[in-house]
Amino acid sequence: MNALNRDHNKRIIRFDPQAKKLCRRLARNSPSPLEFGEVLASCRGRDDIVAALCQLIGEKPSYLAIQTAWPWLEKRVKSPCKCRVMHPSVLMTLCHLYDHHVTDLRNWSFTRLVKWARKIQTQAEAAVAKSENQVTKRLCRCATKIRKNR
């Protein structure tokens, strides 16, 4: 609550902030040390893949928790099936494949889904490593030019 007082012709504004409660739905701030393929493989036979993944990493069921644990799941990817996935991030595509192809149509095996997820993870991690390597090379070149100009 704001209160305005005048003391010795000075304005004093008092503010009494209430302690903010942290949202319990927010996921941890760091990626999971667990390998995604292993965690996914242990979800065999579950009805809800999102709830199963979140339970295994100790979070409440949410897409945010999964994407925080494994940031590469936000990457856009081409769907391996002929279906039109609305928001083709790896996570949305994975959920579509599990719900529609593994569970409903049964034209994908769970093992095939896990192999696909591991392949996409390997590609995503390789792309990140390549981009980090390119940034490091650029920084080294810039540092060399700065030293030469001195």
Image (spheres, rainbow, N blue to C red):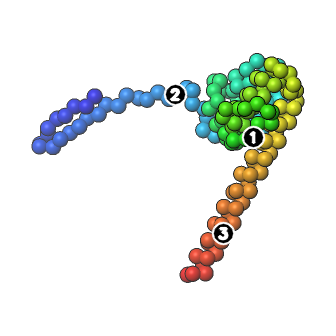
Q: CA distance from mark 3 to mark 1?
A: 35 Å
Q: CA distance from mark 2 to mark 1?
A: 33 Å
Viewer can see residue 16: yes
Disc 3 designates what residue? 140
Q: Which mark is residue 78?
A: 1
Measuring 75% from the left and 46% from the top, which residue is drawn there?
124
Q: CA distance from mark 3 to mark 2?
A: 42 Å
Label 1, secondary structure: give it: loop
Q: Residue 77, how many percent across, how many down?
A: 73, 41
Viewer can see residue 39: no
Q: Point out the tag, 3 or 1, that comes first from the N-terminus.
A: 1
Label 2, secondary structure: give it: loop
Q: Choose top left, top right, bottom left or bottom right for residue 134.
A: bottom right
Q: Amino acid at mark 3?
A: Cys
How busy is the neighbourhood of tag 3: few (under 14 within 10 Å), some, or many (20 plus)?
few
Q: Amino acid at mark 2?
A: Cys
Measuring 82% from the left and 42% from the top, which residue is drawn there?
119
Q: Choose top left, top right, bottom left or bottom right for residue 130.
A: bottom right
Measuring 72% from the left and 37% from the top, which residue is drawn there?
90
Tags 3 and 1 in contact by the CB under 8 Å rule? no
Disc 2 designates what residue? 23
Q: Residue 116, how many percent across, how many down?
A: 83, 37
